[in-house]
Image (tube, helix red, strand yellow):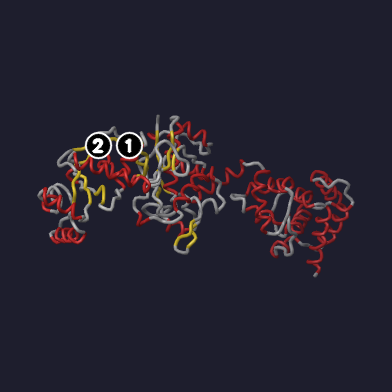
Amino acid sequence: MVRVRFAPSPTGALHIGGVRTALFNYLFAKKHGGEFLLRIEDTDQNRYVEGAEDYIIKSLEWCGLTYDEGVGKGGKHAPYRQSERKALYREYAEALLANGWAYYAFDSAEALEAQRKAFEAKGDTFIYNWATRGSLENSLSLPKEEVEKRLQRGDAYVVRFKMPEGETLQMHDMIRGDVTIDTSTLDDKVLFKSDGMPTYHLANIVDDHLMEITHVIRGEEWLPSMALHLLLYRAFGWQAPEFAHLPLILKPVGNGKLSKRDGIKYGFPVFPMEWEEEGTLLKGFRGEGYFPEALINFLTLLGWNPGGDKEIFSIEELIELFDLEKVHKAGARFDPEKIKWFNHQYLQMKSDTALAELFQPILKEKGLSYPTAALARVVGLIKERATFVADFWELGSYFFVRPTEYDAKALKKQWKDNTSEIIDEVSDILRNAESFSSLALEERIKQYIEEKGYGFGQVMPPLRLALVGEMKGPHIFDIMEIIGKEETLDRLKNIQLATKG
């Protein structure tokens, strides 16, 4: 059984890059009939942010990325919060100490800093590994009695991994192919601290093994840790999972990884939901009016493509087509205009009734009440030009509130000497109309224009100005039918008063 996990740290809002990592794990699991887990990696308590864990869970829920096991849901490998698994990591650290793959190190922060400065003075870089460990304070260099004495005394220590010297490690990444590295260039990473807390490296490997993770799909920033993690699996005598490191999501312009600062600078969201940080409210895709389906479709195609020109995919299609081997190695540039395009496409695909229901809260905020069925007709006329539901008000406010001002430039251009007379004549026709349907009104006004020998440009633009206040909007007779006879006549009367005044 394929088992994958998304394992974020609760150190702040879930970045959109993290959402994509969760998404690719989800797609891979579902493609192979597997299971998708959520684990919270909160071993670094100094960076823990209140509310971040809840934010992560709600973000995944909004995106539709339902996990099979994990925090808040439970499962056969509970608990799924690393701080609640603290007790079990010590035994694994001790197992590595016992089999020679790890050692105690008692070096103080001050002593290590002095080493770094001494190396820098010679133009070198200090690395705690095979070349230096023999001259430092650890259980490999100190007498056994001294080590036991320090441990019994309660001296602060860390447990370091004993990186092999001179081995060419052969590794395989499902996206990047074969990778080799000389272990002599790597440092002896800290795995465990005397306060009982493991570092990311130890906890991550132990949990992945105990939770039966078969594939580790994570961001490329973890690629440098792959060698250590594979060696940890070897040290424990465990079968390692397969690894896949996803490309970065890049800034829209310039170089480097997309960051929250880019969102602030350019005015677009980089988080799934809004998040308050140090008194600043950071934009979220949900709050800005994006549909989760549009975000998911957009994110899937950032760094992956099934081939062909098709861009709109349902989640079922994405699951069927998803293939890690088609994920690109190079970073994918975030395009804020492209995700707007996706949102526009998904808005057009929704039913008018569904969009009307989403529009209702906006009308309610403005103190307006409108039946959903009638509102759906309005939405159907204006949605083609909308990217977000919030656009409906700007595109169609005149359906609900009559204009009190008229576009001055358009009025000057369209209002001729005989326009008032035309408006009066049209008003009489509308007042006496037996049917106020769009089709009936259009036929009657066209007949009037032909009888009078007018051009359409003499009649239709002034009518639009009267009803809308400016030269925009859908078919003029559709507007008349929706706002009704009384309102239409009142608006024609109002523009007459405004032009005479």
> Where does the C terminus fall, quadrant-wise?
bottom right
Mark 1 packing: few (<14 Cα in 10 Å), some, or many (20+)?
some
Q: Residue furthest front?
A: 152
Horizontal relation, residue 370 to residue 92: left or right: right
- Give residue 193's position: percent from left, percent from top: 26, 51
- Reading the image, the residue beneath label 1 is 209
Q: Amino acid at mark 1?
A: His
Q: Which residue is most to the left?
A: 143
Residue 473 visible to an observer of this rendering: yes
Calculate the distance from the C-alpha at mark 1 to the C-alpha at mark 2.
10 Å
Q: Total of numbered circles in the picture?
A: 2
- Labelled pair 1, 2 in contact (Cβ < 8 Å): yes
- Residue found at x 59% / y 49%: 387
- Of 433 and 154, nearer the camera is 154
Between residue 393 and residue 45, name the one nearer to us. 45
Q: State the residue in front, 166 or 90.
A: 90
On the image, the x and y values in percent for residue 83 come to 37, 48
Mark 1 and mark 2 lie on one chain; the one further toward the N terminus is: 1
Q: Secondary structure at mark 2?
A: helix
In the image, residue 175 above or below residue 144:
above
| Residue lying at the far bottom of the rendered structure | 501
Report the disc number at residue 236: 2
Residue name at image x 75 percent, y 59 percent: 402
Name the amino acid, label 2.
Phe
Q: Is residue 256 rendered to the left or right of residue 232?
A: right
Question: Is 98 left, or right, of 11 in this rendering?
Answer: left
